[in-house]
Image (cartoon, grey):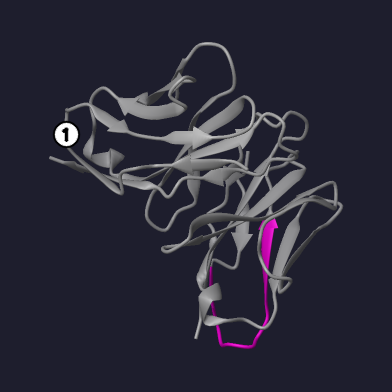
């Protein structure tokens, strides 16, 4: 079985400050890891993914994430947050050996960036 | 390239009715997955279709079913609606082949059961 934990329901940060959204996962074997963002009344938008290779992954809109195998974590980061980054963020995992494309999502973290 | 489209965007039904939701994937994408999003349960996987065959199924009752057509368009059906079926239903498509391909999500269908 695979699972994802996002320990913070909400993260508040001032505009211009660094933003971190935490994610830990559990999966058999090597993972495929994804971050998605959801704006109000919209579907999920893909931000970035980790497949293999470099532990630091760069994605859309200035976001990046660091894969840490020993800590089974995949935290999302942005060096300087914008008010427009306020949204709901989801971490997701798929096991390398899993059949098909089923994603298991974390519970989501709401990010509020204040001007 | 057009994104994933879902129709209708909003639905209001009453308990006991049935509903059919439609999803058109991105051109060339043959894998279509469905997810249910609720405030209490978060995002939960319903099922996945690939080349008209169900490849994966989540832990939902048999009232939830789906199918995929030869043009990769997919429908899901919920019969005997319950209040707890009120949710945002998201469809996602991805390229066939390797499972490391990201999924692209549609805007969702918001179902309200009264």
Place of residue A38 in the rendered image (x, y in percent of width and height, measured from the top left): 42, 47
Q: Residue at x 66, y 60 (%)?
A: B59
A70 or B82: nearer the eye?
A70
Q: Is residue A8 above or below residue B39?
A: above
Tag 1 secondary structure: loop
User: Tag 1: Cα neighbours inside 10 Å, few (<14), some, or many (≥20)?
Assistant: some
Chain at numbered mark 1: A
- Position of the C terminus of chain A by quadrant: top left
Q: Please tell me which residue lies in front, A95 or A21.
A: A95
Q: Quadrant of residue A81?
A: top left
In the image, A48 versus A67, the foreground residue is A67
- In magenta segment, residue B13: yes
Q: Quadrant of the N terminus of chain A?
A: top right
Q: In the picture, residue A75 is in which quadrant?
A: top left
For residue A6, what is the image quadrant?
A: top left
Range shown magenta: B10-23
The residue under the point 26% across, 30% down is A19
| Residue A88 in the image, given as x and y percentages of width and height | 36, 47
On the image, the x and y values in percent for residue B15 come to: 58, 87
The residue shown at (31%, 49%) is: A9
The residue indicated by pointer 1 is A15
A76 left or right of B107? left
Helix, strand or loop for the magenta stretch, by majority:
strand
Percent across and percent down for residue B61 are 69, 70
Q: Nearer the viewer, residue B10 or A102?
A: A102
Q: Is residue A8 left or right of residue A55?
A: left
């Amino acid at each position: 079985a695979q699972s994802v934990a996002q320990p913070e329901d909400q993260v508040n940060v001032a505009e211009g400050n660094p933003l971190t959204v935490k994610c830990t996962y559990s999966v058999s074997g090597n993972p495929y890891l994804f971050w998605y963002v959801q704006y109000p009344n919209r579907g999920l938008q893909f931000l970035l993914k980790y497949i293999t290779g470099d532990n630091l992954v760069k994605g859309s809109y200035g976001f990046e994430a660091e894969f840490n195998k020993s800590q089974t974590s995949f935290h999302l980061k942005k060096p300087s947050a914008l008010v427009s980054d306020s949204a709901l963020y989801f971490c997701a995992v798929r096991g390398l050996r899993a059949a098909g494309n089923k994603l298991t999502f974390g519970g989501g973290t709401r990010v509020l960036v204040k001007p | 390239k057009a994104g994933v489209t879902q129709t209708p965007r909003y639905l209001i039904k009453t308990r006991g009715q049935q509903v059919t939701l439609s999803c058109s994937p991105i051109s060339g994408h043959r894998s279509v997955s469905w997810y249910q999003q609720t405030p209490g349960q978060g995002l939960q996987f319903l099922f996945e279709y690939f080349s008209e065959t169900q490849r994966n199924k989540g832990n939902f009752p048999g009232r939830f079913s789906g199918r995929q057509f030869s043009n990769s368009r997919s429908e899901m059906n919920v019969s005997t609606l319950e209040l707890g079926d009120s949710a945002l239903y998201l469809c996602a498509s991805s390229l066939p082949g390797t499972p490391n391909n990201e999924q692209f999500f549609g805007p969702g269908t918001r179902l309200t059961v009264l």
